Image (spheres, helix red, strand yellow):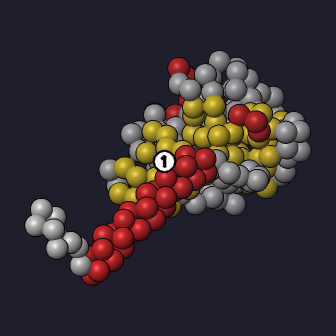
Amino acid sequence: MDSGKRGRSPVADTAVRTVYGWMKVFTLVFCAGTLLFGICFRLFRVSGISMEPTLVNGDMVLVNSLIASVETGDVVVIHSDIEGTSSIVKRVIAVAGQSVSVDYAAGTVTVNGADLPQPVILRVEDLARNVDDEVRYPYTVPAGSIFVMGDNTRGSFDSRARRIGAVDRRFVVGKVAARSGREGFGIVRSRQ
C-alpha cells in the first residue's frame, strides 16, 4: 500500500454508495413532491368573517386546484378583486341552471324550492349594510356559473350582490380541502 494514501475497504465503499443512492432518491422524491404539490394544491389565508364558524379570519386553507366539478355545498376559493383582495372564500349554494330564492322575512334560502339544510339567519337590514344592490329572486344561475354565499350570511358580501352575482366557473381556484388555524387542523367538508 502506498504510504501517502489509505485504501478504503469494500464495506466503506458500499456504505458510501448506499448513502449516496438514498440521497438521490430523497432529492428526487422531494423535488417531485414539491412540483406535484405546487400544481395540485395551493395555500390561502382567510381574510374576514364571512365564512364563520367554518373558517375564521387568519385560518390557512389548503385548496385542491385539480377539480373536475364544483357541486352545491363545496367551499371554494375564487379569484376576485371584490373587497380589496385577490381571492375570496365562499360556499357554493347553487350551480348552473338551479333557481335560488332568498326570503329575508322568513330567514331562508331555497334552491329549486328546497330550503337549505343549515338554518340561515338573514334580515333585510343586515343585507343592506353589506350589499349595494341585490339580485332579483327567484334567480336562475346562468350556464358556466355558480351562486356563492358565506356561511356567516350576516357578514358576507357574496352572490346576493349584483356586483358579484353569479361567479363564472373559470374564476374558481379550487375546492378547500383542509384548514389550519387557532382551533387546529381540520378537514373542510361539503354540505349537501
Q: Is residue 125 visible?
A: no
**Quarter of the figure with the N terminus:** bottom left
Closer to the camera in the image, 64 or 31: 31
Q: In percent of the image, x 65 and y 18: which residue is there? A: 132
Q: Against 142, is 41 above or below?
A: below
The percent position of residue 154, horizontal first and vertical second, equals: 54, 36
Kindly give the residue lying farthest to the bottom in the view shown.
Answer: 11
- Taking the image as drawn, is residue 167 in sight? yes
Q: Amino acid at mark 1?
A: Val
Q: Position of residue 149 (x, y in %)?
A: 64, 40
> Which of 132 and 90 lies nearest the eye of the viewer?
90
Count all numbered tags in the image, as a single digit.
Answer: 1
Rate crowding at label 1 as few (under 14), some (14 to 19) or many (20 or more) other CA atoms within 10 Å: many
Residue 87: x, y in percent?
A: 57, 31
Q: Which residue is drawn at the image coordinates 35% and 57% (left, top)?
A: 184
Residue occupying the point 30% across, 74% down: 13
Q: Looking at the image, is 80 positioned above or below residue 52?
A: above
Image point (77%, 46%), residue name: 94
In the picture, the quarter occupied by the C terminus is: bottom right
Q: Position of residue 74 (x, y in %)?
A: 66, 52
Q: Residue furthest front?
A: 2
Q: In the figure, is residue 101 to the left or right of 38?
A: right
Q: Nearer the viewer, residue 60 or 101?
A: 60
- Residue named by callout 1: 61
